Image (tube, helix red, strand yellow):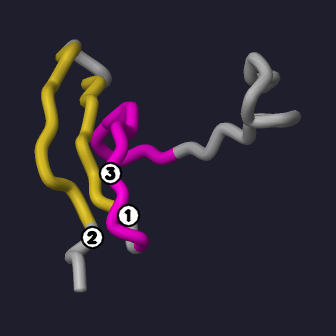
Amino acid sequence: MNETGKIGGTRVYHGRIISVDLDEVRFPDGSTGTLEMIRHPGASAVVPLLGDPGDDPEV
């Protein structure tokens, strides 16, 4: 069975308020992908993307 979770990553921006990371992850089905993560100490947010995943995202 494949373990899921972060398998690598790169910090692409580090500022006074936020950092932006590109995290390489393994999903439960064994596939891998890149997640764009915005990190801020003490805050969280969820941004819904509306429409077909193949189209340009509408926020």
Mark 2: few/some/many CA within 10 Å (<14, 14-19, 20+) = some
What are the residue bounds of the magenta stretch?
A: 29-44
Q: Amino acid at mark 3?
A: Thr
At x 36%, y 44%, the residue is: 33
Q: Left or right: where does residue 12 sit relative to residue 57?
A: left
Q: Secondary structure at mark 1?
A: loop
* x and y percentages locating residue 44 in the rendered image: 48, 47
Q: Which residue is mark 2?
A: 4
- 7 or 48, which is in the foreground? 7
Magenta stretch holds residue 42: yes
Q: In the image, which is nearer the foreground, mark 2 or mark 3?
A: 3
Name the amino acid type tagged 1: Phe
Mark 3 burial class by Cα count in 10 Å: few <14, some 14-19, many 20+: some
With 20 as the anchor, is 48 left or right in this view? right
Percent x, y for residue 17?
30, 21
Spatial distance from mark 2 to mark 3, Cα to Cα? 9 Å
Q: Nearer the viewer, residue 28 or 37?
A: 28
